[in-house]
Amino acid sequence: MGRAPCCDKANVKRGPWSPEEDATLKNYVQNHGTGGNWIALPLKAGLKRCGKSCRLRWLNYLRPDIKHGGFTEEEDNIIFTLYSQMGSRWSVIASQLPGRTDNDVKNYWNTKLKKKILAGKLSSFSSNNNGGLINAVQKPEAAAVSLPYYSTPLPIPPDVGYGFSVSSTPLPILSPSCPNLDNNIVVVSSQQGSAVSDSAGNGYVEDTGGILVDDHHQQQQFSFEFPYEFINGGIGGPSLVDFSHADIERGIV
DNA sequence: AAGAACACCAACCGCAAGGGG
DNA sequence: GCCCCTTGCGGTTGGTGTTCT
């Protein structure tokens, strides 16, 4: 037996909300609150709507503190930074932006901001204070072995689908030729990779041979890959030249 | 001018988590 | 501990407006 539907779909209205419905819902919530039960609310308020629909309409549109209108550059940067760190945790990201909803942020990211970043038009991505690099933070679930959570400057925005893997066999200790070896996490070296493609025909540039060193001088080999057209500058991203050994070394923390 | 393609965003869907009985 | 109900979340869809050809 499957899950019981949250409401009787045959007897509820769907689709866009009318101004009358908005007014009814707004008046009811402002006068009576939600009563802690959205499922029962539409019946009490006299709305032929699903409780979930009412909740969504209130949270995303009717709440008095909702901010409508375009996102500012500062908001762009906050979204980008938080997305870099935690991925698509829209509710968490939205909680850092007063008046914005998770749906707003999600839509904005998917329709505009992602393109803006890929075009290199976001200040935190294109500025020179980090050598043109941004902090791409490894997603925890991507780690194949237990390593400290770390950030590594890479010339990519976090949404371009880079993969990340760590070899299971620790490498021999590298000679400490790198002046930053004593820092917590170091990307010691990297090299330009070769173009590869997956079974669906999507092109990637695969970079291999990077070394991570943690604060116990334990080393792990890693590899990562980026969509080929992005690395190749085809959609406004950096050219392959930007993705060099030197650039990554410059970003060592 | 008209149809096609694209962009935007509100709304829906299904799943997981949380809480109460 | 289990079950059921509700809420919250993130992914996806579909309608509408705009731009392009």
Image (cartoon, coloured by chain):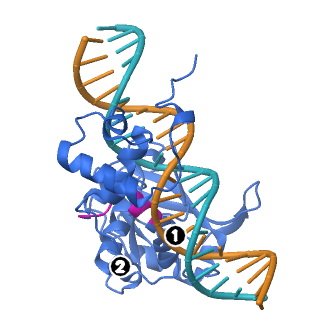
Chain colours: A blue, B orange, C cyan
**Does residue A21 appear left or right of residue A30 in this picture?**
right
Q: Judge from the rendering whether residue A46 lies leftward or rightward of residue A157; answer left or right.
A: left
The answer to the question of whether label 2 and label 1 lie on touching residues, with beta carbons closer than 8 A, is no
> In the rendered structure, which amino acid carries the disc numbered 1?
Thr
Q: Which residues are magenta?
A: A98-107
Q: Residue tagged by mark 1? A: A111
Q: Is residue A78 magenta?
A: no
Q: Please state which of residues A85 and A94 is positioned toward the viewer in this rendering.
A: A94
Asked which secondary structure carries label 1, the reply is helix
- Observer-nearest of A62 and A121: A62
The chain under label 1 reads: A
- The label shown at residue A124 is 2
Is residue A245 visible from the viewing direction of this image?
no
Q: How dense is the environment of label 1, judged by Cα within 10 Å: few (below 14), some, or many (20 and up)?
A: few
Q: Residue at x 25, y 61 (%)?
A: A96
Report, in whole angstroms, how far the alpha carbon at label 2 lies from the one at label 1: 19 Å
| Residue at x 22%, y 62% (from the top left corner) | A65
Task: Residue A13 in the image: state x and y as whole percent.
Answer: 51, 44
C15 above or below C19?
A: above
